[in-house]
Amino acid sequence: MSRNRTNRVAMAEQADRHELYEDSVQDPESELEFVSETFETLTGRPLRSIREDFCGTANTACHWVRSGPDHSAIGVDLDGDVLEWGRGHHLVELNADQAKRIRLLQDNVMTVSTEPVDAVLAMNFSYYLFTNRELLRAYFERAREALVDDGLLFLDAFGGYDAHRELEERTEYDDFTYVWDQASFDPIHHHMTCLIHFEFPDGSEMKRAFEYYWRLWTLPEIRELLIEAGYSDVSVYWEGTDEDTGEGNGIYEPAEVGDADAGWICYLVARK
């Protein structure tokens, strides 16, 4: 006799939020390809060492040390539980040599002290959690101190007129649906609450799997604060457009003029 449907474990209860996040949000291979190619173009030498700030599960840092025998990485995050998940799911897959070239630190990016690296990465808009100019400038100053003399800071940013709206966007994957929820937005301070939910084919949901309380920074503000923090040059890398689809083509190039899109994601690269 078949089991009663009420006895079945819901897909949401079996799912791991970190695995879902990595599958839907992160693309370390493409991201690191952009970082390494841009670094070599700007400095004339290969990228070898990175520090991944707000590293979470250290997925990107682990991918970096696996991608080359001379690649090293430091991951910094305040959340010890998330770092432990990364150790148990990513670091355990590294061989002995790779494991020697990565270090995870449960620490505050505002106070942590590490050996100088070629590049500091603060991706997935993580630095948006600094909601005033003084804090964000102070973080940029600390990141600059962590760089070698020709080092680069890599950031991503998002915006567009939809970024100012309260909305939900759904993206379907094979076994789940990713829901990006801009739950609230304050136009006076540009403070926003963003949530990530996951929905499953059996009708179950993982609500508020991740929560973010951010300031929606504009590109002029970010560039100005980077210069104030001492960086010698800041470039915006804008995504090109596929002529056939009208969508982004995944190729980011330096730009001084962007498109007034409903939603965009770009990179900023700051030279020490």
Image (tube, rainbow, N blue to C red):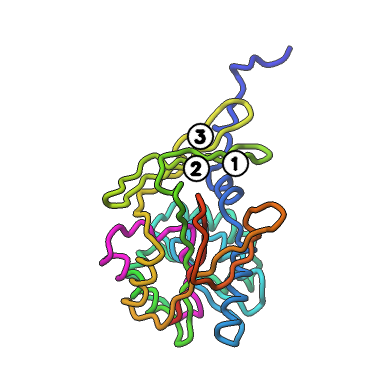
> Disc 1 residue type?
Thr
Residue at x 58%, y 25% (from the top left corner): 203
| Of marks 2 and 3, the one in the foreground | 2
Q: Is residue 218 above or below residue 254?
A: above
Q: Is residue 89 above or below residue 40?
A: above
Q: Say what secondary structure mark 2 lies in.
A: strand
Residue 266 placement (x, y as % from top left): 52, 62
Based on the picture, tell me whether residue 161 belongs to the magenta stretch.
no
Quadrant position of residue 77: bottom left
**Bounds of the magenta span?**
115-137
Answer left or right for 36 relative to 51: right
Residue 38 placement (x, y as % from top left): 58, 76
Viewer-closest of 77 and 133? 133
Q: Which mark is residue 206?
A: 3
> Disc 2 residue type?
Trp
| Residue 51 in sight in this render | no
> Disc 3 residue type?
Met
Q: Upstream in the sequence, badge 2 or badge 3?
A: 2
Whether tag 1 and tag 2 are in contact, CB under 8 A, the answer is yes
Q: Which mark is residue 171?
A: 1
Q: Is residue 44 above or below residue 2?
A: below
